[in-house]
Amino acid sequence: MPSGKTHAVVEMALLPALGAAYYVALQPGTVELAVFAGAYLFSSLWLSPDLDLHKNAARRRWGPLGFLWTPYSKVFKHRGLSHSLVLGPLTRLVYLGLVLAAVIAGLSYLWGLALPPAEKAAAFWQNREVLWALGAGLYLPNVLHVLLDRGVSALRPRRAHARGR
């Protein structure tokens, strides 16, 4: 399989071309293009499908918060659901959302922090162009990662067949 460095190099090398294709296809505004690029970088560097492994570059990038992904790696076996083209990124986004919700709820309870009004959050989620940019930016690096894994696997001869001949 490709190393974590290989995945990172391929994903970063394709960001300008994918950003240009996104711009040409959808003619987004500056905000949407920035959301796409930011989400792409975040997903590529911190939401790798390899977070299902105990030790990897993506988990190290989380620094002292890398331990947050330990339950995720216990639930999802490597190259299982976490490497699904559609459900893989969704599992990490839902997991991260649950962790953030627990942290926010805990801080709110402990220190009485006020949560932002629901209207402000709702306004963000109603902007379809931003949502498309966010979704595309979060999903594309994961799709590239999985396709690179599958492509390399398809090109390598299977060991069982190689030994038998």
Image: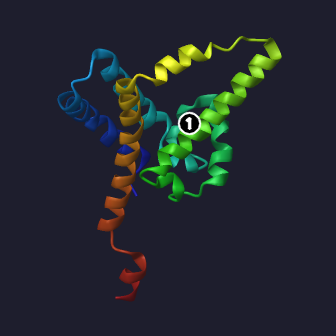
Front-most of residues 126 and 107: 126
Residue at 38% x, 27% y: name it. 128
Check the image and report above or below for 123 versus 139.
Answer: above
Task: Specify the farthest residue to the bottom.
Answer: 165
Q: How is the image coloured?
A: rainbow
Residue at 35% x, 41% y: name it. 140
Give coordinates of residue 18: x percent, y percent: 25, 35
Give coordinates of residue 40: x percent, y percent: 38, 32
Front-most of residues 115 and 81: 115
Check the image and report above or below for 102 versus 52.
Answer: above
Packing grade of label 1 (10 A; few <14, some 14-19, many >=20) is some
| Disc 1: which residue | 60
Which quadrant does the N terminus fall into?
bottom left
Check the image and report above or below for 94 versus 156.
Answer: above
Give coordinates of residue 19: x percent, y percent: 25, 30
Residue at 71% x, 30% y: name it. 102
Residue at 41% x, 44% y: name it. 142
